[in-house]
Amino acid sequence: MTQEEKQNLLKFACYIEKTLNPNYILSYMKGWLSDEDVEKIRVEGEKGPTAAAKLFLQIFVNLTEDGWFLEFLESLKEAGYSGLHEAICSWDFQMIEKLENPRQLLKRIGPSLRDIDPEKLHPVLSDCILDQEWEEIIQVKRNKGKGASALKLADCLYRSDKVHWPKTFQLALEQENYGDIAEVWDFKDGDPCDATDFEMTGDDEDSCTVDINFHYTEDAQAANYSENSCSSLCSPAEPCQRSTYFPKEARSYQNELAQPALSGKNTIICAPTGSGKTFVSLMICDHHLRNRPAGKKGKVVFLATKVPVYEQQKKVFQEHFERTGFTVAGICGETAAETPVAMVIEENDITVMTPQILVNCLSDRTLPSLSMFTLMIFDECHNTTGNHPYNVLMSKYLDLKFEQAATPLPQIVGLTASLGVGSAKNLEDTIEHICTVCATLSAQVISTVKENIKDLEEVVYKPQKSIKLIGKRPESRFVDIISHMMSETEKLARKVYPLDTLSHIKSRSFGTQKYEQWIVEVQKRCSVLQLPDKEKESRICRALFIYTEHLRKYNETLIINEDARTQDALAYLKDFFENIKSVGFDEIEKKLASSFEDKLPEMNAISQDESNDNPKLEEITFILEEEYRLKPQTRSILFVKTRALAAALKNWIEESPQLRHLRPDVLMGRGKRNQNTGMTLPNQKGVLDSFRSNGDSKMLIATSVADEGIDIAQCNLVLLYEYIGNVIKMIQVRGRGRAKDSKCILVTSESERAETEKNNMLKEKMMNKAIENLQKWDEATLAQKINDLQMKQKQKQDSKKKVSPQKPKAGSQKLLCRKCKRFACVSEDIRVIEGAHHTVIDNNFRQCYITRPHENTKGYGNFQKQCKLYCGECQHDWGITVKYMNLDDLPIIKVESFIVEDIVSGMQRHFRKWKEVHFAMKAFAIEEMSG
């Protein structure tokens, strides 16, 4: 080891000590250590891995033998410390240093992580944590329970050297439906990774959404396949074998739906759930590829917003085209990073993919433009709004259309069950809304079934819709007790910090969704709370997370109690406290648990008192008894708002003498903090397979996972228990009842919900009338309307590109170090270089920072990196210095390292990106640097 390497190792020791657990590399390094040293390190490890790593480094840097340093590097590589290995090889710890903020946030939100099940996150997080760590996490779960293993996972993530772990953790949380924690974590954008490295999540991509939607083969589509075809649903014990596809004739209404697209027109196909729109899209693809002009090859992309839908449609397309000579490939978020996307698209006739990948590839120039495709099919095309990837793609389409008129454009086909009405209140506005959707998708025609209605009605049965308004549950002593505990918990939280300053929601009631929104907002604000006293800041944030997590559970308990039995609501709360107890209390949790234990005997007595039975459940019992008395073969779906409520209602039905014969199954999303909820993908498929095949279960209790795309032809009763949405959601949910003479009943105690549902039914009629009116327009009139709307859309797009929002003049803000609050500069002295980089021209700024040589002095553009820039007080990373033009050591600062304080009001704000700041900055002029 050279003297320089030794000095560097000591200089960067703090990063190594925070990351390395020596126990994982000792076996590789034993040849360099005495047994006594190994034992010392193991003993020190009982204090924690940081202490062990510190001793480990002390021992090694004092070795006089040559060769140990290379062995150390090799050991890091073998053990899986790829990030640390790379940092030491280049002596550049910038990427590991960027993990400091997410590490601190992880410490803050610790109390809210106990309900995570690490095993569910493992498939996504597997490459963020060492194999040995995963083994330890599983062992902790077996010995001490899920809560303890979740904290072990957090410890391992805290020490992870993988630069992408914060965003991968975000992805895992969202994919496994830990939505509340994901809201607080919120590392999708910016720090510490570039957002384009990963596929978009949230509402845009259901690879990681709160409820996972399945799209199984629709009734009419199934009729287009031979009886030898394998069902799209297989039981978990019997994996699907690849089926042999034998095409049958399309139904008359399917030919009608396809006709405009077959003639080459941009088309929106609007047809009911269950009508076989996927089969129609296969017909269109096949025709498109077989009827290309001589010498011009077709290139098709089929876009599906949800990963399960993507998987299903990819399989359908592959089976359809495997005998035709046309090739099909699939790309989704899970495979995109390792896939040569451009090559896959180039070498296949049809590519099935999720839209965010296509957006990313166009943005980073992996793909040149949409003109490389000849046909684009948008599944669930009503999503083409706002910031959805569909809308981003069509914005690029619009740019091509108006800016490169000679460039060939792909044909567009959209598939949907409902175009909705937007915010329209009358027919005229509804027509305008639908025209806007058509303009967004550049559609020339809306294709619906008009001539072959009878043929459609033989396949798709429209359930009879009704509303059952029932009485609310009377107030009870149980509600009073929980509400009192919530009030007391809020009081304790306010003693720690003025709670109401952390949320704009002032009016909220216990046991409501609004209260849940308030908790989410408080936790999010708390995560970026800045106080001069860092220890106090950490203490306050941790306490607030504990209090708000308890408030969340109390709130969910009240929601369950309103719609289910008190005993099920109480069981939910008991599970929460048992889980905390298995991990170990801190002082705050002990006090809250003691308060709960004091009230538990009374709550137990209330939950067993028959006079407290829920009258809402009596109404549900009456409806189900009547339906099954008249039709014993009835098969029903009961839609509910939450997974916890689904589990509670399952318990109630199984214990009800009148209803236990229904043997209900539950269908819900793939993850939930509570260990009794959440389903794996095979379990979901197994439940649906059993229900569809006339198994023992006559009822499904489902969350919104089942409200779109699931085919259950035998279902003839849909109950919506306090469950509503907009007109599009209503049509999709109602479509679950596919059997002849089926019913769809909204059961609610809220007159507002009943009114909303009635309005949705009226809006559906208004939407259908608007479509009928538009279909009567002559082609030229509609084309002119679409073109006018597109011109407006294009102007709006261009104005967003050219005009930045007007910001107030600089001069009234000062920048403080985010870590120690030391003054750095005023905003008036900040200049923008080449529209993207920010420097400070005040010479006094140089007294505020120190520099260290940058080990990775790569150049980029007109800049050459020179040094790292640190706060002179606390060594917090402020940015870099560069050589620019003839200027040496020009400071380039990053706004995320600072707090922006208003000089007049004293208000402080934190920004992750310069584009977010609320003050104006002047462009850089070299003349200003003459001094």
Image: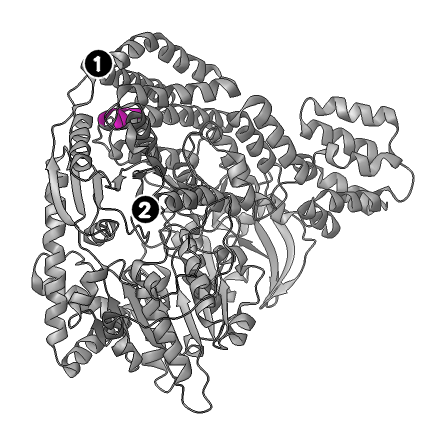
Task: Please tell me how crowded label 2 is: few (under 14), some (14-19), or many (20+) other residues with Cα within 10 Å.
Answer: many
- Residue 273 vs 69, above or below: the answer is below
Instruction: Name the quadrant containing residue 641.
Output: top left
Quarter holding the N terminus is top right
The CA span between labels 1 and 2 is 33 Å
Magenta region: which residues? 557-562
Relative placement, left or right, of 32 versus 848 is right
Query: What amino acid is found at the position of numbered circle 1 in the picture?
Result: Glu
Magenta region's main secondary structure?
helix
The residue carrying mark 2 is: 706
Give amino acid for label 2.
Answer: Ala
Looking at the picture, how far across and down is residue 812, in whole percent? 36, 47
Residue at the image position 21 percent from the left and 71 percent from the top: 446
- The quadrant in which residue 499 appears is top left
Return the residue at label 1.
Answer: 610
Mark 1 Cα shell of 10 Å, populated few (<14), some (14-19), many (≥20): few
Q: Is residue 834 above or below residue 868?
A: below
Q: Position of residue 786 (x, y in %)?
A: 21, 75
Local secondary structure at mark 1: helix
- Sequence-wise, the earlier of marks 1 and 2 is 1
Numbered label attached to residue 905: none
Asked whether the viewer can see residue 342, the reply is yes
Q: Is 266 on the left-hand or right-hand side of 118? A: left
Residue 866 percent across, percent down from the top left: 65, 57
Q: Is residue 371 above or below residue 276?
A: below
Q: Is residue 228 magenta?
A: no
Residue at x 71% of width, y 25% of height: 45
Q: In the image, is 271 to the left or to the right of 822?
A: left
Q: Residue at x 75, y 38 (%)?
A: 10
